[in-house]
Amino acid sequence: MLLDPENTLFVRGATPVLFLAGASVHDALPPLTAPDGAIPRCEGWSIVPRLTLCVVDGPGDHGVLVPALAAPVIGDTDDGTAPGRMADWCDDTERAGGAVVLSLDRLPQTLDWSALLSSGTTRGGFLPAMG
């Protein structure tokens, strides 16, 4: 399924994050349980980060395509809210060996990590990058 880039948010960092809002894969991703902040790995899932298209691939027919070049990228500059570049996010993902993918009903207004990791409604985890 193709996900509208307006329903995504790429966050740069040592471990990059991809937020998905209203994605068809939401129920297929495991519920996120990370009360201590340690993000679990999503078995059977992977991410292919590319400048123009980001692929989140799961088991069976589960997966989502994001037109990455049109998607918002934040973090790693200024106070964490300045627009970044997709190429930098892809580089972050390569260095980290993957990215954290978090699926929600809607994108968060603020990045309150403790609330996101303990909300009980967030699904996802760490996805290894595939070449």
Image: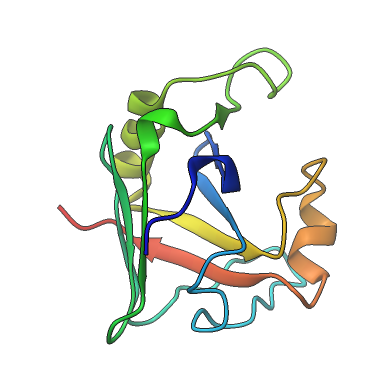
Q: Is residue 87 above or below residue 116?
A: above
> Percent position (x, y) of residue 118?
81, 70
Seen as rendered, the residue at the extreme bottom is: 60
Left/right of residue 30 with respect to residue 68 in the rendered view: right
Q: Is residue 20 above or below residue 46?
A: above
Left/right of residue 64 with respect to residue 6 in the rendered view: left
> Percent position (x, y) of residue 28?
49, 83
Q: Is residue 99 above or below residue 83?
A: below
Residue beneath the point at 50% across and 57% down: 100
Residue beneath the point at 59% across and 28% down: 74
Residue nearest the viewer, comparing 115 with 25: 25
Please tell me in which quadrant of the rendered image residue 27 appears: bottom right
Please tell me in which quadrant of the rendered image residue 34 appears: bottom right
- Coloring applied to the structure: rainbow
Please tell me in which quadrant of the rendered image residue 95 appears: top left
Residue 127 visible: yes
> Percent position (x, y) of residue 29?
51, 79
Seen as rendered, the residue at the extreme top is: 78
Q: Quarter holding the N terminus?
A: bottom left
Residue nearest the viewer, comparing 107 with 84: 107
Q: Is residue 104 above or below residue 49?
A: below
Residue 15 visible: no
Left/right of residue 31 with respect to residue 119 in the rendered view: left
Left/right of residue 123 with respect to residue 51 in the rendered view: right
Residue beneath the point at 52% across and 33% down: 12
> Percent position (x, y) of residue 131?
14, 52
Residue beneath the point at 53% across and 48% down: 17
Tally of numbered discs: 0
